[in-house]
Amino acid sequence: MSRLTRKSEILASSIISSTNKALASLMDIWDGLGVKEEMRLQRIEQVKRHIEELLNKMIHEERAMKDRLEKSIQFSRKELKALCHDLSVEEYKIEENMTILQIEKDLRVRVDVLTKQKSDRLEELQILQQEDQQLCSDLCVTPYYIPSGSIPSLEQLEQLKEHIMVQREEKRTRLQAFSILRAEIRQCLDDIGRQPESSLEQDAICDDDDAFFLTLENNKALTVLKTQLELRKEALLSTLNTIKEKVVSLWDLLQVTQEERQACEKTSGQSIREELSMWESELARVEELKMANLKQLILNIRKELKDYWDKCFYSTEQTEQFAPYYCDDYTEDLLSQHDEEVIRMKALYDKCKLILDAVAKWESSWTQFVILEKKALDPNRLLNRGGSLLKEEKERAKLQKLLSKLEEELKSRIDSWELEQGCPLLIKGSKFMDHVANQWEMLKQQKEREKQDRTQKKEETTPFKTPIKRPAAAYSQGTPSSKTRKINGTNYSTMSRTNVTHSSVSQTTVKVPLPTIKEEISKKSCKDAIFNSTINENL
């Protein structure tokens, strides 16, 4: 700074020196011209006046410039303060030891920077508000609020951007949901063969996405509409399935050919309403055929009813309760009664299918068990040496175990079913366990009767026996024990008795005709076989 000051002082001194030289030159000129002193004074006064005017003018201009700079500084400070407030930034602080020119320039530059920031923010705010306004208009929600006329802060702009992002995602989600609902509503309308009637239905299937306001209420209304259409569709499908079942049932009763059925079942590309109309026409047609073939239909239904009675193990008393089964007056009312009974029996069978299947398994096993029990009472089976006795015993034990297991399972199932339904489940007219007890009792009584019949028949057919004397040696060989021995389930009493019989016969010295001896041996073997069979029954 001192160096600059010296240069200005030197320059000022040079101005004074130049002025002095100029005045000296003027003096020389005036001396050569012979200008008088008065004239010289006037002219020097004029030079002085010109120099003073010039310097005064310059001083005035510099002072005016200084005033302008000071005013500019004051204005810039005010404007800068307002900008800092509007832009929510800290106030600008002037550095110390700065000249007026530096301060003015620094403030002016800072004002320009903040002014541009203000302009940029306002421009960005306008763009963001336009987008936000459009999104909120589509979604029917309130836009992000920024007081009008104010300059948004950076934080407010960020919040506005986040708000717009949320609204974009919300619009995308609602639009996706709307697109799905629109497609489902269109499909439902096409399926049930109905044109859109209300304004909501028309807006829902419109291809222009912007024509529909994506409000939560509109989406809820579309959801309700879709639900109503689906319920309508389900009702039509239920009606259609019911009519189909009736038609198929009548087809079966009327024995309609497969070609006629296929012609009616080809319904590709039709709406549910159109398909329903077609099946209703078919139902009306087969109903007419049914009226023309009442007797045959009733007979066919009776066969089906008989099958259900057998599957449900109905007794004769239970079947006789349905009196129309035995009626020969073939009317439409009789057909309806049979239809209702078939429906009732089918529902009962479907409800108890698992239990009835288990009962059928028990009945089948019981039949096999009874057959094996009868075989066990046949004396002729002892003459079979192929090992079938052991197989039969194993099979009989296996069936007896299976029957016991099935009885326990069925008792538990039937008790639970009766508790749930509040009514008894009858098998051949009685409760299952009573039925089982009756079967076992009947088998026991049958075995007793057969045993008595065999004993009586034996007593009637046994001839008078001739006493046979046996030597002491025959008795010295030992007498078989009266106790029956069983090894691995096989009765060996018959074998011991047969051996004793043969040894006794071989050592007898009584003169008896040969045929009589053979008859005795045969009778003895039969007696032993019956004896062993009786022991097996008791075991």
Image (spheres, grey):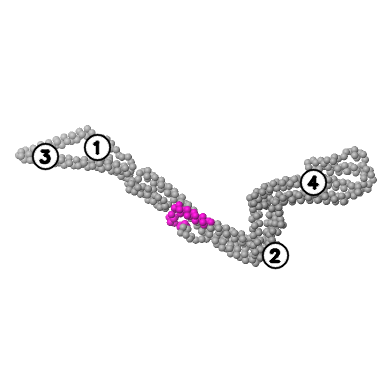
Task: Give the Cα distance between marks 1 and 2.
Answer: 131 Å
Q: Rounded to the nearest whole Å, what is the CA distance between mark 4 and mark 3? A: 168 Å
Counting every numbered tag in the picture gives: 4
Residue 26 placement, left or right of 389: left
- Which residue is at the front of the view, 399 or 184? 399
Is-magenta flag for residue 324?
no
Task: Give the residue number, with chain letter if any, for mark 3.
Answer: 48
Circles 1 and 3: CB distance less than 8 Å? no
Three-letter residue code for mark 4: Glu
Q: Is residue 242 above or below residue 160?
A: below
For label 4, the crowd category at 10 Å Cα-Cα, with few meaning under 14, some 14 to 19 and many 20 or more, is few
Which quadrant of the figure contains the N terminus? top left
Specify which label sits upstream in the sequence, 4 or 3: 3
Q: Where residue 359 sits in the image (x, y, percent)?
A: 69, 51
Amino acid carrying label 2: it is Asp
Q: Which residues are magenta?
A: 203-231
Residue 462 location, x and y as percent?
88, 49
Q: Is residue 204 magenta?
A: yes
- Callout 1–callout 2 Cβ contact below 8 Å: no
Residue bearing mark 4:
537
Task: Tell whether label 2 touches label 4 (CB within 8 Å).
Answer: no
Q: Could you tell which of marks 4 and 2 lies nearer the N-terminus? A: 2
Of badges 1 and 2, nearer the viewer stands: 2
Instruction: Indicate left or right for 510 with 381 as reference.
Output: right
User: Residue lying furthest bottom in this view?
Assistant: 292
As helix, strand or loop, the secondary structure at mark 4 comes to: helix
What residue does disc 1 label? 99
**Does 500 appear above or below 360?**
above
Quadrant assignment for the C terminus: top right
